[in-house]
Image: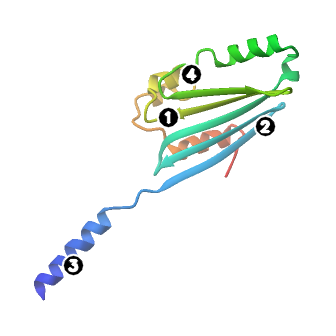
Amino acid sequence: MKKMLCVLMAVLLMMSGCAKDEENKAVCKLETDGIVEEMTLNALNDQVLKTTSVMRLPFAMYEIETEEEKALFTEQMISGLEYDGITVETKSTEDEFVLEMTVDYETVSFEDLVLLGMIASEEADSEIVSFEKTLESLKSSGYSCE
């Protein structure tokens, strides 16, 4: 009986030490001066694993009318976004330019994120991008998050 109790206690200790990972997801939106941005954050516990940002920019806001102007605008918008761990896709409708950028935080370097202005330089030495801190930062910048 005593031996069985010891085994049961050992099993309970092992189970309590194995906390279940928690998947977190948030969708944050911001609309400013006709520009609409929606960012989806995916995290495991407090570590952001991936973000997908979709930004919609109306051409009229930039006085862009011709197909040549649209092509030049697209080229300028994606210029400088070629980094490992960052995927950029674009599309245009008659009225707006849509930029979708996905950042894989398990692949991208923190130095590249600092260069792009996506994290502060003091965070470059961190091992993770915090889900909670990112949500706080987005909310303080005017995003509404769910």
Pointers 2 and 4 in contact (CB under 8 A)?
no
Residue bearing mark 2? 31
Q: Residue 116 carries which label?
A: 4
Mark 2, Cα crowd under 10 Å, few <14 / some 14-19 / many 20+, is: some
- Mark found first going from the N terminus, 3 or 1: 3
- SS at badge 4: loop
Query: Mark 3 belongs to which amino acid?
Result: Leu
Query: Mark 1 belongs to which amino acid?
Result: Asp
- SS at badge 2: strand
Total marks in image: 4
Residue bearing mark 3? 8
Which percent across, then down, holds residue 102?
Answer: 57, 33
Which percent across, then down, holds residue 100?
Answer: 66, 31
For this rendering, which residue is in front, 84 or 134? 84
Tell which tag, 4 or 1, sits nearer the viewer: 1
- Mark found first going from the N terminus, 3 or 2: 3
Mark 4, Cα crowd under 10 Å, few <14 / some 14-19 / many 20+, is: few
Query: Mark 4 belongs to which amino acid?
Result: Leu
- SS at badge 1: strand
- Mark found first going from the N terminus, 2 or 1: 2
Q: At 75% across and 14% down in the image, what residue appears?
A: 71
